[in-house]
Image: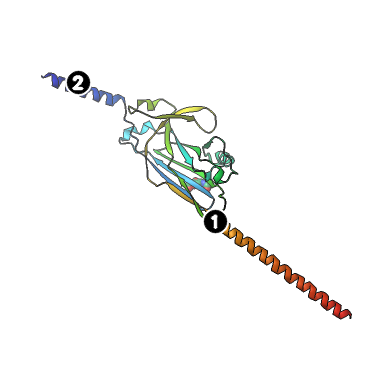
C-alpha cells in the first residue's frame, strides 16, 4: 500500500469520526413576516419554521427559545404598557430595548429595537407584535410617509448546552434572557431565508395647503354668518321701531 493511500484512509476515517461527534447545525430556518390590520395601529406577525436537512437533528432546536431582534423605523413604535398588558393576558413576550417615548412625532424619533421571544414547538414558532405609527407633521401637498420594516435577526438559545455540538463557527450576541428579568444570556444567531419582502407601511400625512384652505373657509363662514345675523337683527329692530311709530 502506498503512503498516499494510507494518508487518504486516515483523513477519511478522521472526518467520519468527527461527523459522529459534531453537527453542522444547518437548521434551514424560514421566516414569514406580515403586517395585519389597517390604519395607525397594526399587528406584525412572524412565522418561523426550522427544516433541518436531517430529521434526526430536530432535537437540536426543539423546546429551545427563539428571539427576534426587530428594528423599528422612527415612524413606528411599540407601547411598553400595552406589551406589559399583553404579557399578562396573552403570554406575549416582547421587550423594547431601552426607553420608548410614545408621544414623540416621527421627526423627533429614532429607530428603536424590540425583542420578541417564543418557544420552538414541533419545529415552529409563531409570534406577533402590536405596533403603532407615529404622528407626522403636516407638509405642503400632504401624501404619505413610508415606513420600511426590515426583517428581524433570528437568535436561538437552549437551556442546556446542546448547541455547543455545532461545528459551524457560530455568531453569538448577548441580551435579555426573557421578559421577566434583567438577566442577560448568550444567544446564537441563526441565518434564515425570508419568505416575504420588507414590510411597507404608508402613513397618511396632513396637508398644510388644506390647512390654509380650511382656515380660509372657516373665516369666510364666520364672516358671512355674522353679517347675516347682524342684518337680521337690524331688520328686526327696524321693523320693531316701525310698529311703535
Ligand atoms: C395579532 O395577530 C395574531 C395572529 O393572527 C393574533 O393571535 C393576535 O391576537 C393579534 N393581536 C392583536 C392585538 O390584534
Seen at 67% across and 66% down, the residue is 221
Quick check: 107 above or below 19? below
Left or right relative to 225: residue 102: left
Determine the image quadrant of residue 172.
Answer: top left
Tell me the number on the disc at residue 140. 1
Q: SS of the residue at dot 1?
A: loop
Residue 233: x, y in percent? 79, 72
Q: Residue furthest left?
A: 1
Residue 193: x, y in percent? 36, 41
Q: Residues within 10 Å of mark 2 (few under 14, many from 20)?
A: few
Residue 190: x, y in percent? 38, 34
Quarter of the image with the C terminus is bottom right
Seen at 32% across and 33% down, the residue is 56
Q: Which residue is mark 2?
A: 10
Left or right relative to 219: residue 48: left
| Nearer to me, 205 or 46 | 205
Quick check: 112 above or below 22? below
Q: Earlier in the sequence, mark 2 or mark 1?
A: 2
User: In this rendering, which labeled residue sits more in front, label 2 or label 1?
Assistant: 1
| Nearer to me, 232 or 101 | 232
- Can see residue 120? no
| Nearer to me, 119 or 193 | 193
Amino acid at each position: 500500500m502506498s503512503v498516499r493511500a494510507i494518508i487518504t484512509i486516515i483523513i477519511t476515517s478522521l472526518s467520519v469520526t468527527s461527523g459522529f461527534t459534531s453537527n453542522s447545525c444547518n437548521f434551514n430556518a424560514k421566516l414569514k413576516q406580515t403586517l395585519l390590520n389597517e390604519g395607525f395601529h397594526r399587528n406584525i406577525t412572524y412565522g418561523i419554521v426550522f427544516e433541518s436537512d436531517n430529521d434526526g437533528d430536530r432535537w437540536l432546536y426543539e423546546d429551545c427559545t427563539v428571539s427576534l431582534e426587530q428594528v423599528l423605523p422612527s415612524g413606528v413604535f411599540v407601547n411598553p404598557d400595552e406589551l406589559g398588558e399583553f404579557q399578562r393576558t396573552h403570554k406575549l413576550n416582547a421587550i423594547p430595548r431601552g426607553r420608548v417615548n410614545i408621544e414623540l412625532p416621527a421627526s423627533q424619533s429614532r429607530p428603536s429595537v424590540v425583542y420578541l421571544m417564543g418557544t420552538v414547538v414541533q419545529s415552529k414558532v409563531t409570534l406577533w407584535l402590536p405596533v403603532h405609527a407615529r404622528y407626522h407633521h403636516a407638509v405642503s401637498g400632504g401624501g404619505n410617509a413610508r415606513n420600511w420594516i426590515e426583517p428581524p435577526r433570528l437568535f436561538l438559545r437552549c437551556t442546556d448546552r446542546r448547541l455547543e455540538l455545532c461545528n459551524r463557527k457560530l455568531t453569538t450576541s448577548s441580551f435579555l434572557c426573557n421578559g421577566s428579568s434583567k438577566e442577560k444570556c448568550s444567544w446564537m444567531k441563526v441565518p434564515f431565508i425570508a419568505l416575504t419582502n420588507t414590510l411597507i407601511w404608508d402613513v397618511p400625512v396632513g396637508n398644510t395647503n388644506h390647512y390654509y384652505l380650511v382656515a380660509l373657509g372657516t373665516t369666510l363662514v364666520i364672516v358671512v354668518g355674522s353679517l347675516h345675523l347682524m342684518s337680521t337683527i337690524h331688520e328686526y329692530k327696524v321693523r320693531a321701531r316701525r310698529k311703535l311709530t
